Each structure stands twice: as structure tokens, then as C-alpha cells.
Image (spheres, rainbow, N blue to C red):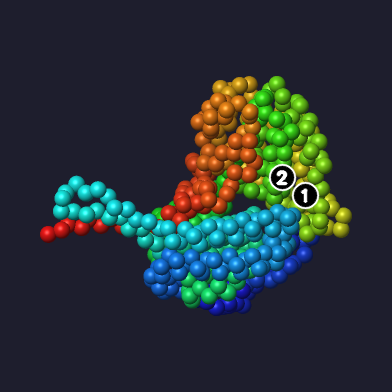
Amino acid sequence: MLYINGEWKQAQSGKTVPVKNPATGEVIQHVAYGGELETRQAIASAKEAFDGWKGKTGKERGAFLERIAENMRRERDNIAEAVTREMGKPLAEATGEVQLAIEYVEWYAEEAKRVYGDVIPASHENKRLMVFREPVGVVAAITPWNFPVAMITRKLAPALAAGCSFVLKPALETPVSAVKVIECFHEAGLPRGVANLVIGPAQEIGAELTRNPDVRKITFTGSTEVGKKLIRQSADTVKKVSMELGGHAPFIVFADADLDEAVEGVMQTKFRNCGQTCISTNRIYVEDSVADDFGEKLARRVASLTIGDGMQEGTDVGPLINQSAVEKVQDHIEDAIQKKGKILCGGRPTTVEGLSGHFFEPTVIHNASDEMKIAREETFGPVAPIFTFHGIDDLAKKVNHPEYGLAAYFYTKNVDRAFQTVSKLEYGIIGVNDPRPVVVQAPFGGVKESGIGREGGTSGILEFLEEKFVSFRMT
């Protein structure tokens, strides 16, 4: 179903599309398939509702968000199950994602009351200078399939807290979980038109969202290629944009690190969600004196992972999202082998008894080099290539990617080396001996072609506000 102006609707054409479970191949549901017409209706609805929503106090908007969080807590298990069936991640991971999504709503329920302005010291005795922060307007949010719930609330909770109305376009692979989240918004009693959901073809809906002058802000999570296209399309109406784009995260292991802890760090940053996260480790740099030992430890740990349906207890790694993803991972591995990479474990597509999903063996590659595709392109799959370096100066020449700069991780026990490394890394998020640096109260985002703007924390709500400067001359 589509959600427009406070009502659940079918597409005017009556068209629906199937949503398939990537672990089993079965159709789990058919959803309405709208397009340009429904998107225009949703935008018009959001515009009509904007002034009324903007006019509410921060405390009032926060109360709505608290009700949304309460609804999502009540439906947590149902939403998590929808995530697993749609995109394959183990149910425990999906449950953790829904909990994170709830925490974003709770955080911004409080931040709604804390949108402060400024009083600036005047340069003239008869002037008073003030800055007001006001909501930007109608927001269009385009969210990905790999974190289909958390990315919705990380965008829409601050938008609502700031006083914006919105139109949400979720990924076609994962619309069912988006519907369940918007049901929680609806049941919170939001005024008609404040929240809108359209499902349909990305190009058609995206074109309308970017060219329509009533949309004043685009927030997108997805590939760098698509992000660039959305920026170009938004230029004609000079929209405000936030882009959380591709990543190519390095994971660095210095010789003085606890290798067992570093291995567990890789397990969390590389094989979570089958390697299908924007902050997933894509390159592992190990100081040469411990590289062989680290590779053996990592390969043993990776080989112990259980592959299967995310709904089955004991599954560590679910399927890739589709066959194209399998082919890309296989291409990167074959390229690495041709360029003298050594497979320590995994390396092939695989099957799971009774299932027809898109499964791939978790893989560790030793002797990786800069000539390999995996050193330059985002793999988005369960492949861990190990590169080596000799000292921090050698590392500095290798670790910063020419295009990407989203997340990086490193392990060391030396405090001086830690601060030196932080200063050399060109990334927006850095985990020092920490494989899980992302929290709701901190900014999330990258540099270079990994994105524009920040989500989460105080920074996240500022993305949905405009500053209005007032110079008041007293007579």
C-alpha cells in the first residue's frame, strides 16, 4: 500500500510488484507500485501539511515522535521479521537494527525541543542581531535496502523534529518493512499529509522528487553513482541535499595490537549483513610482521561461520540480496586470484539445503594488492582481502582511497600511534579498537565522494533547518 495524505491507497493503475525473500526465492508479499502521479500527490499533500506542522512547538512534535517510538517498540519483532524476510540478514541483526531505529526516534523526540537560535554581538549600538533556525520545507527521503528501517528513522525523525513534512521512497527490495514503519507513524496520529510513502520505479519517482520545486530537501542513502545523479537533477531547483554514499573502509592492524581482538573486530565490521553495509570493511591492512599469523587466525574464525536463512536460529551469515550481487563478488575474487591473491577460506557461491537463495561463502584473501578490483571498487559482499604495510609512513601512502572516505577502523595499543593514525586518515567515521562506532548521538557521514552532510546527533537535525538572519535597527 501507498500512504498519501493520511490514507492507505493502491496505485491508481492497480499495479503491484512481488517482494521476494533472497534466502528462499519465495514471494512474501505483493505491494502497490505507484509512479509519477502518486509522487506528485504525495508532494502536494506534504506541502499542504507543512505550515501546520511547522507551527507546532518542539515539545508538541517531540510528543508525536515519542508515540512513534512506542509504536515501534510494540511492533519490533514484526518489523524485524519483515526485514529478514525481505533482505536476508539474520533475525538477531534485524532486531538490533529495529532497536537502533527506535533509538533514533527517541533521540530526536528530545532534540525537537532544542532547536536553538543565536544572538550575535552587534557592531552598532542601535542594532540587535539574531539568527532563527526554521524547517527547510518538504523533505524527500530515499532509503536503501540494506538497512531498510534504521535509515528511515535516521532521516525522518530529525526531519519531523525540525518541523518538516516528508515523502518517503524506500528501496523496491524492501518495501514491506517501510510500510510497517509508516504504520507506526500513522498510528501516532500525525496530522494528515505530514508523512507520505510512495513505492515504485526509482528513476520515475526520483525524477519527480528532484524536479518538483515544492520539495526543498533531498536526503539519500545509496550508491555514489545514484547520489551524483540526484545531485545533478536537484540542481535546477537548487535543493538542499544530504548524501550518504559509497564506502571503502580500511581496517588496520598494527603489530602491537591484540590480534584476537582485531580478528573479532573484522568479524563484526566485515561479515555483518553478509558484508552489505556502507561502512563494511573492504580492505584489511596488517603490519607485515604479523600478517601471516593474523591471516591464519581470521581464516579459522571465518570458516566457522554458519550460512543460511536468517529466520533460522544459529545462522551467522544470510544471503546476498540478488544474483547480480553474487556475480560481482565472484568477479572480484576471480580478479584477485588472477593477480596472485591466495584464498585462505571460502571463495565460491554456495547452496544451503532446502533453499534456493543467493548464498556466498565468507572469504579471506591473502596477498592482496593495489592492482586488484577489490582495492578500488566497493565489493558489498563477504570478502576480506588482506594487504600488508611496513610502518605508519608506508600505511599513510596506501590507506586513503582517492574517492571514498566514509569509515575506517584500526587496532593498536600505542596511544601516540593512535593519534598519529587518526590525523592521517581521510574518513568521516573512525573506530579506534572499536568495530561499532556508530551511535545515535554522534554524526554519521563521509568525505570526498562518500557523501555530503551528516546524519545522527545534533548535526542530523541541522540538516533539516535553514538559518534566517535578522538585523533589528532601533530608532
Three-letter residue code for mark 2: Phe
x and y, in percent, of residue 37 in the image: 50, 73
Q: Can you say whether 370 is above or below 269 in the image?
A: above
Which residue is tagged 2?
Answer: 271
Which residue is tagged 1?
Answer: 316
User: Going 66% across and 68% down the picture, which residue do you hit?
Assistant: 74
Is residue 400 visible in the rendered structure shown here? yes
- SS assignment at label 2: loop
**Would you call the spot at circle 1 few (<14 residues within 10 Å), some (14-19), or many (20 or more)?**
many
x and y, in percent, of residue 446 in the image: 51, 44
Q: How many marks?
A: 2
**Would you call the spot at circle 2 few (<14 residues within 10 Å), some (14-19), or many (20 or more)?**
many
User: Going 42% across and 58% down the picture, which residue do you hit?
Assistant: 114
Drawn side of residue 338 relative to residue 418, left or right: right
User: Going 63% across and 28% down the picture, which residue do you hit?
Assistant: 413
Q: Can you say whether 15 is above or below 395 in the image?
A: below
x and y, in percent, of residue 125 in the image: 16, 50
**In the foreground, 313 or 356:** 313
Quadrant housing residue 412: top right
The reply to whether dot 2 and dot 1 touch (C-beta < 8 Å) is: yes
Q: CA distance from mark 2 to mark 1?
A: 9 Å
Disc number placed over residue 12 in the picture, else none: none
Three-letter residue code for mark 1: Asp
User: Going 15% across and 53% down the picture, which residue do you hit?
Assistant: 126
- SS assignment at label 1: loop
x and y, in percent, of residue 61 in the image: 46, 67
Q: Quadrant of the C terminus?
A: bottom left
